[in-house]
Image: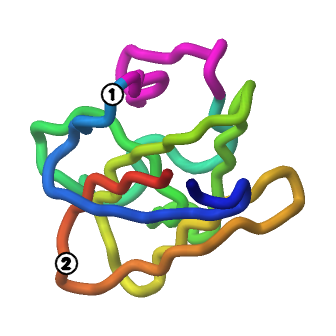
Amino acid sequence: MLPASAVTLTTSAGTTTSTAGAATFFDFDSIQNTSIGSFSGGVLNGGLSPCGATCGNWLSANSFSNLNAPFTLTLVNPVSYLGFYWGTTDAYNVVSLFDGATPLGSFTGIPGVGPLQTNVL
């Protein structure tokens, strides 16, 4: 069993997860279930699409129109799983996880890896 503050990161190709019980609560197109969580900040469709014309809308924290537009995901309740599609894993892209003001971990992109389905347990 992992300690309460442990963070495990796994990656896989694609935009879906095999994690049992996982639910999509925000997809930037039509699904937004605020009983699970909400986003603030960022730029909708900022910059170039991370996955071409087939992926729909996306959220950017660094766009051509606003070079520093961080966004925050606020969850209603504690979770044991968080998954997201990381379309551009460049070295200047960083994802940081917090429990309130307490940092749990940060992940920096790796150039050339390509899009990832990122699962944080």
Instruction: State whether residue 63 is above or below residue 40.
Output: below
The stretch in magenta equals 21-37
Kindly report the secondary structure that dominates the magenta region of the rendered protein: loop
Q: Left or right: where does residue 56 sit relative to residue 73?
A: left
User: Residue 92: where, in percent of width, then height?
Assistant: 47, 84
Q: Which element is circle 1 on?
A: loop
Is residue 57 or residue 14 the one in the foreground? 14
Quadrant of res 17 = top left
Checking the image for residue 97, the label placed there is none
Q: Nearer the viewer, residue 61 or 121?
A: 121
At label 1, the amino acid type is Ala
Percent across and percent down for residue 71 are 64, 51
In magenta segment, residue 26: yes
Q: Residue at x 12, y 42 (%)?
A: 53
Residue at the spot of label 1 = 20
Please state which amino acid type lies under the numbered disc 2: Val
Residue 80 at x, y percent in the picture: 57, 40
The residue where tag 2 is placed is 113
**Of circles 2 and 1, which is in front?**
1
Q: Is residue 85 above or below residue 44?
A: below
Q: Position of residue 75 (x, y in %)?
A: 69, 33
Q: Is residue 82 above or below residue 5?
A: above
